[in-house]
Amino acid sequence: MPLFKGSTIPMGTPITWIGLISLPLSIYFGISKFQEPTHTLYKYLGPLLTLSLFAAFLWVPISYVLAGNLSFSFSEKEGFQGGQSAMKWFWGYSYGVVILPLVLLLAHWIWALAKGLKK
């Protein structure tokens, strides 16, 4: 479904983009240790979370460069842009944008659980 009447941009593109940006932002604003790191672990996790936020912001421009269109559709053509090799990069990048903040959240949970068990 187009974003607006006469548009070639599908509605899913901005919706997905907002979701990808919201994931690292919700972790950042939901866990105060990422905002004010008190432990060495969070001094490393914080910049990685910032990196994941930048990767999420750049998802549309990078995906556009890879696909050559804003619907992010790929074909069987020989060249890189819009081809099968670009599609592999697109999916790898897209999965990475989602997986990195989830791994950081998991690291936080494991650290909090280990710290709680220690007490």
Image (cartoon, rainbow, N blue to C red):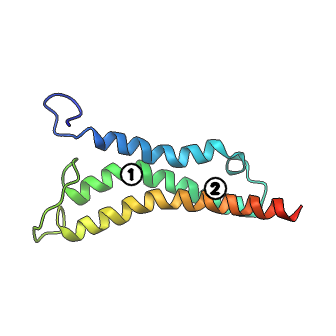
Helix, strand or loop at mark 2: helix
Residue appearing at x 31%, y 51% in the figure:
61
Residue designated by label 2: 46
Residue matched to label 1: 58
- Name the residue rendered at 75%, 58% in the picture: 112
Q: In the image as oriented, which residue stretches furthest toward the left?
A: 77
Quadrant in which the C terminus is drawn: bottom right
- Farthest residue to the top: give it: 5
Q: Position of residue 99 (x, y in %)?
A: 48, 61
Figure check: 42 above or below 89: above
Disc 2 crowd, CA 10 A, few/some/many (<14, 14-19, 20+): some
Task: Name the quadrant containing residue 75.
Answer: bottom left
- What kind of residue is marked 2? Gly
Q: Which mark is residue 110?
A: none
Between disc 2 and disc 1, whose residue precedes? 2
Q: Residue furthest front?
A: 117
Horizontal side of 67 relative to 43 (left or right) equals: left
Residue at 17% from the left image edge and 66% from the top image edge: 83
Which is more toward the observer, 41 or 31? 31
Element marked by disc 1: loop
Disc 1 residue type? Leu
Q: CA distance from mark 2 to mark 1?
A: 19 Å
How crowded is the residue under tag 1: few (<14 C-alpha within 10 Å), some, or many (20+)? Answer: some
The quadrant of the rendering that contains the N terminus is top left
Check contact, mark 2 vs mark 1: CB within 8 A: no
Percent from the top left, x then y, of residue 7?
Answer: 16, 34
